[in-house]
Image (cartoon, rainbow, N blue to C red):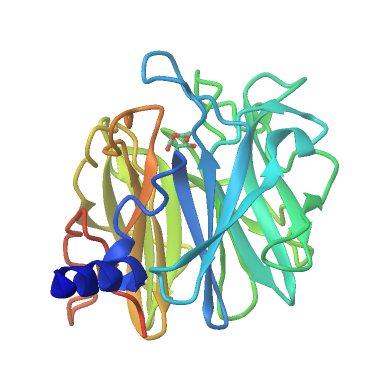
Amino acid sequence: MKKHLAITAFLLTSTSLLAANPLFPEVRTADPAALVVGDTVYLYAGQDEAKDNKTFFVMNQWLGFSSKDLKTWQRHGPLLKAKDFSWAKGDAWASQVIEKEGKFYWYVTVRHASINGFAIGVAVGDSPLGPFKDARGSALITNDMTTDTEIDWDDIDPSVFIDDDGQAYLFWGNTKPRYAKLKASMTELDGPIQKLDLPNFTEAIWVHKKADMYYLSYASGFPEKIVYATSKSISGPWQYRGILNEVAGNSPTNHQAIIEFKGKDYFFYHTGAAQPDGGEFRRSVAVEPLYYNPDGSIKRIIMTSEGLDAVQ
Ligand code: FUB
């Protein structure tokens, strides 16, 4: 009996055994975006508020989380809402936060109130947890700036990458992948919108760099698999390298964030696997280790219920 109590006490206090995938079982989260600042990972995710999996997404705000070991997470609640952009109607879809010179820029997908379709906005704050406020008072990208598709949700899923020379690039898109340079202000385009050539592209671009290789991962097909391409230059050409993550349990969408933290690499994604009510419109964020091969390719992600051990 004494031994049983000791084991129970160990399970309750050992964070490395308690936290698993999905990371935040008490809330539905989607479209993870991770940011490393010093010894902390900040994780931003849209909140899936749909009551069931029958109709469509209900997403009004983005939640913030932070961790120093990827196992014990602090919940910071909503850090930004779609309605914080006065020109937006709602739909807090995928986003990414990036740091430049001590400021934190949060690029978001929202539905525009007066221009048909989805748009990309940017908020700014002085810390990774904000407070954040609309940096422009208007959208950075609107649907009427990209007229080569029939759909009105082609301007979604921003991912911003700052190259070693300080030049920032905004990538985004649904069905048509695009990118443009950003001015030093981070809130204005600097030049034309360019097209990318990526096979079977759906959405969810994430750009990162490892050693001297650029990586562009994205959701492909539908239901979505996360695939990736590599390049020796941020402006391409991009070489398709294959599947990174298979279709995630019980969710036709997927959306990834890739980071290096304390010397190791990690892959955040979402699934519909949470019990009892996870699914297409009630997703949950999870995390797995990510491993590079010596030739720069990435090993296929293995989705697990256990998740990670605590990072020391
Ligand atoms: O969460 C709403 C949309 O579904 C995102 O913008 C896409 O990436 C997909 O996950």
Which residue is found at the position 47% from the left and 41% from the top? 27
Which residue is found at the position 54% from the left and 59% from the top? 65
In the image, residue 159 above or below residue 102: above
Farthest residue to the front: give it: 1
Q: Is residue 141 left or right of residue 45?
A: right
Q: Is residue 81 left or right of residue 34?
A: right
Which residue is found at the position 14% from the left and 69% from the top? 1
In the image, residue 156 above or below residue 65: above
Q: Is residue 306 left or right of residue 23?
A: left
Which residue is found at the position 29% from the left and 31% from the top? 276
Q: Please state the horizontal and vertical placement of residue 148, each as a whole percent of the image.
A: 52, 27
Count of residue discs: 0
Q: Is residue 291 visible?
A: no
Q: Please state the horizontal and vertical placement of residue 5, each as a whole percent of the image.
A: 22, 69
Q: Quadrant of residue 201?
A: top left
In the image, residue 88 above or below residue 241: above
Farthest residue to the right: give it: 137
Q: Nearer the viewer, residue 80 or 158?
A: 80
Q: Quadrant of residue 61?
A: top right
Q: Please state the horizontal and vertical placement of residue 275, each as a whole percent of the image.
A: 28, 35
Q: Please state the horizontal and vertical placement of residue 99, each as a whole percent of the image.
A: 65, 70
Q: Is residue 138 visible?
A: yes
Q: Nearer the viewer, residue 85 or 2?
A: 2
Q: Quadrant of residue 100?
A: bottom right
Quadrant (top left, top right, bottom left, bottom right) of the C terminus:
bottom left
Farthest residue to the top: give it: 55
